[in-house]
Image (cartoon, grey):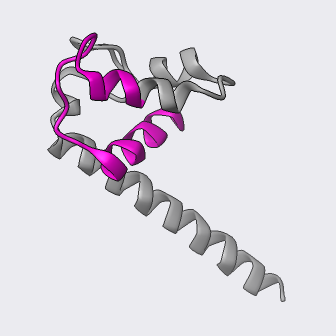
Amino acid sequence: MKSIVIAAVLAAGMAAAGTASAQEALAKSSGCMTCHDVATKKMGPAFKEIATKNKGKADAEAKIIAKLSAGKEHPEVKAKGDDLKGIVKWVLAQ
């Protein structure tokens, strides 16, 4: 029984890591990583800084998606729809 629980926990962890890896790859292919990095400031703030700044804000995801989609305070992004939503969720999870 213990080994089944351990296997389930490991599988869940691997699935979550795979999703994060996929979102990071999507961020790279969408050009996000040109100006941003996960941990260090480049042209734009680090994703970890964005996550920290928005921690606990229920409307953070919607506000960031609206800002990125509008292209007013941020250059136009290549990712749209569910891809953009997935990247924003990944950024906020840092």
Residue 68 appears in which quarter of the rendering?
A: top left
Using the image, determine if residue 66 lies above or below residue 20. above
Instruction: Give the left or right position of residue 47, taking residue 8 as reference.
Output: left
Residue 18 picture location, percent across and down: 41, 62
Residue 82 picture location, percent across and down: 36, 52
**Residue at the spot x=15%, y=35% of the render?**
31
**Residue at the spot x=69%, y=24% of the render?**
56
Using the image, determine if residue 85 lies above or below residue 6. above
User: Any magenta on residue 71?
Assistant: yes
Instruction: Give the left or right position of residue 22, taking residue 90 as reference.
Output: left
Most common SS among magenta residues: helix
* Magenta range: 65-94
Residue 69 picture location, percent across and down: 29, 29
Is 61 or 1 nearer to us in this picture?
61
Residue 7 appears in which quarter of the rendering?
A: bottom right
Using the image, determine if residue 9 lies above or below residue 56. below
Instruction: Give the left or right position of residue 17, taking residue 11 as reference.
Output: left
Is 54 or 10 nearer to us in this picture?
54
**Residue at the spot x=26%, y=41% of the render?**
27
Residue 5 appears in which quarter of the rendering?
A: bottom right
Residue 81 picture location, percent across and down: 32, 47
Residue 65 visible to an observer of this rendering = yes
Q: Quadrant of the N terminus?
A: bottom right
User: Any magenta on residue 3?
Assistant: no
Residue 39 visible to an observer of this rendering = no
